[in-house]
Image (cartoon, helix red, strand yellow):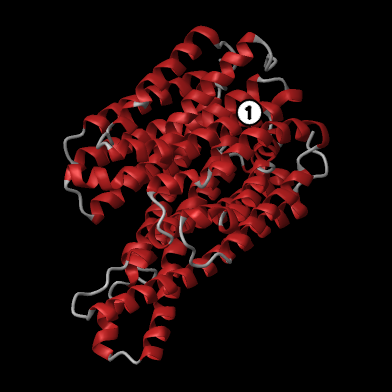
């Protein structure tokens, strides 16, 4: 397949279109958390409604993202990418116009379908269209810009939510998506062809979609119904069984949706294991750091978003450079040291206790965020480059879909498992503190009912003012105890990602 230089006019237009399209998905993914209070008030939504508004998109995205990547390889990457953008625009417009919760959940599902077709397509287009010697640099550029909009999402969401304009988080996707479609239609001609002679593996597609849907749903429900609930056991067990069935079907299929031979390459396998562990740690760490900043440390939503600005600056400054350097010397060194550095940043953050609020930021949270950002800046582009370089151009969409699926499932896994563990650690610490303070059993039971709310736990009304103040203090102490453990587990997952690179990634990715 003919490739183009990044410096060429078509190369620049290609990069612009993939960055614009990816920005839509990443803005929605981060900004929605911030606008939830405004959205909840406007639509009169309850806690269960918010759960589905947040996760219906993620459920559909995780279920179909592997299929989206494969369809691009089979039917033409640009075509499938553009279809995904169009579906995402329609879903976004419908979300913005939704009069009630039910409509919003349904249209979030539509957004998820668009995202599943769109997200793997962006990296697949870059990998198959940009010349090999510049691939890492291109991926680094894409990573830097998409990270900026990802971390800018909460800032934008906070600003809009303050004025009750939450619907504009969805509407903003419309001009961005139209611009991306216009560029792709008029300026980008690369990567048109697909493997049309190969039939689509419908049984494999159905099995992997159902398996990922069940696994995602099972993990998402853990914080709400518990790890030992029969629904959790049955859903996760069915998901894992369908994964086994999918592997068997792919082994027997003449034209499999996910050729298992891809995993015979140690770099591809190692890079995906690294992705899972690193993004599980990152997802859990970022979630509980954000909760800590707002619920315990007294940061506003906007201030919480701004705390990650050093992370953003490092990604802008270093990701492109890291990708360019990986083209020259290989990805291995970056993929060993990057996740370990990110893990060290999470570990540093675990030692931050109660502070005096934003005024203490520079001496408390800033060092850990700086180290975390440094680790991720040197990991993201080389990691994606390693994944895409370990397979042939014909399978770049499938490879991107697999790697993106790893990222999504890891984040869902982390939020679910860490959510359950955090309640366990919080309850244990709170129980010990209540025992030490000599509370009566009936009072302890009443106080512990709020454990599921973690840092947002509300003190029961039937206590004196002094008792309420002490109980609030115990809630905060218990959250910080749980936070420290979760952050250290997250750090260990980052270190484990570095170990995967040490064991699997080849010294030089050609």
Quarter containing the N terminus: top right
**Quarter of the view holding residue 192:** top right
Q: Is residue 223 left or right of residue 129?
A: left
Query: Which residue is drawn at the image coordinates 28% and 26% (left, top)?
Result: 93
Residue 238: x %, y % from top left: 41, 58
How many numbered marks appear?
A: 1
Secondary structure at numbered mark 1: helix
Residue 86: x %, y % from top left: 38, 22
Query: Which residue is drawn at the image coordinates 20% and 46% (left, top)?
Result: 41
Compared with 58, 89 (above or below) is: above
**Quarter of the view holding residue 318:** top right
Residue 392: x %, y % from top left: 69, 30
Compared with 194, 103 (above or below) is: below
Q: Is residue 306 left or right of residue 195?
A: left
Q: In this view of the protein, which residue sits in the foreground, 212 or 428? A: 428
Q: State whether residue 413 appears in this view.
A: no
Q: In this view of the protein, which residue sits in the foreground, 254 or 340? A: 340
Q: In this view of the protein, which residue sits in the foreground, 152 or 91? A: 152
* Residue picked out by circle 1: 141
Compared with 431, 53 (above or below) is: above
């Amino acid at each position: 397949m003919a490739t183009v230089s990044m410096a060429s006019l078509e190369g620049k237009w290609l990069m612009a279109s993939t960055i614009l399209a990816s920005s839509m998905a990443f803005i929605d993914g981060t900004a929605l958390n911030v606008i939830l209070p405004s959205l909840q008030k406007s639509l009169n939504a309850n806690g269960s409604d918010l759960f589905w508004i947040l996760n219906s998109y993620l459920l559909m995205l995780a279920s179909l993202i592997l299929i989206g990547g494969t369809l691009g390889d089979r039917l033409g990457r640009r075509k499938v990418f553009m279809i995904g953008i169009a579906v995402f625009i329609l879903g976004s417009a419908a979300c913005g116009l939704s009069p009630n919760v039910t409509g919003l959940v349904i249209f979030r599902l539509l957004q998820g379908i668009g995202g599943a077709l769109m997200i793997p397509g962006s990296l697949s287009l870059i990998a198959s269209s940009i010349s090999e010697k510049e691939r890492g640099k291109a991926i680094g550029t894409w990573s830097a810009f998409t990270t900026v909009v990802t971390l800018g999402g909460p800032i934008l969401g906070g600003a809009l939510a303050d004025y009750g304009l939450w619907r504009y988080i969805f509407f903003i996707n419309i001009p961005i998506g139209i611009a991306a479609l216009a560029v792709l239609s008029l300026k980008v001609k690369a990567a048109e062809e697909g493997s049309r002679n190969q039939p689509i593996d419908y049984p494999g597609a159905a099995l992997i979609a159902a398996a990922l849907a069940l696994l995602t749903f099972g993990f998402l429900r853990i914080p709400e119904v518990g790890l030992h609930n029969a629904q959790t056991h049955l859903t996760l067990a069915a998901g894992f069984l369908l994964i086994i069935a999918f592997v068997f079907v792919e082994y027997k299929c003449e034209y499999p949706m996910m050729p298992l031979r891809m995993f015979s390459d140690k770099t591809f396998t190692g890079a995906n294991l690294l992705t899972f562990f690193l993004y599980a740690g990152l997802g859990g760490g970022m979630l509980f750091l954000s909760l800590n900043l707002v619920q315990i440390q007294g940061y506003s939503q906007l201030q919480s978003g701004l705390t990650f600005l050093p992370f953003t600056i490092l990604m802008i400054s270093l990701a492109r450079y890291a990708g360019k350097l990986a083209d020259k010397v290989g990805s291995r060194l970056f993929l060993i040291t990057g996740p370990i550095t990110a893990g060290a940043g999470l570990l540093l953050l675990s030692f931050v206790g109660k502070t005096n609020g934003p005024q203490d930021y520079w001496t408390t949270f800033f060092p850990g965020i700086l180290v975390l950002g440094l680790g991720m800046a040197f990991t993201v582009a080389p990691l994606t480059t390693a994944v895409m370089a370990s397979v042939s151009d014909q399978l770049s969409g499938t490879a991107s879909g697999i790697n993106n699926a790893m990222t999504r499932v890891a984040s869902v896994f982390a939020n679910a498992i860490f959510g359950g563990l955090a309640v366990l650690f919080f309850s244990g610490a709170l129980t010990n503190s209540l025992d030490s303070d000599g509370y009566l059993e009936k009072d302890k039971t009443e106080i512990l009912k709020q454990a599921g709310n973690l840092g947002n736990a509300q003190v029961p009304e039937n206590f004196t003012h002094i008792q309420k103040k002490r109980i609030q203090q115990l809630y905060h102490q218990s959250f910080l105890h749980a936070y420290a453990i979760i952050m250290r587990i997250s750090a260990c997952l980052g270190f484990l990602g570095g170990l995967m690179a040490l064991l699997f990634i080849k010294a030089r990715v050609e």
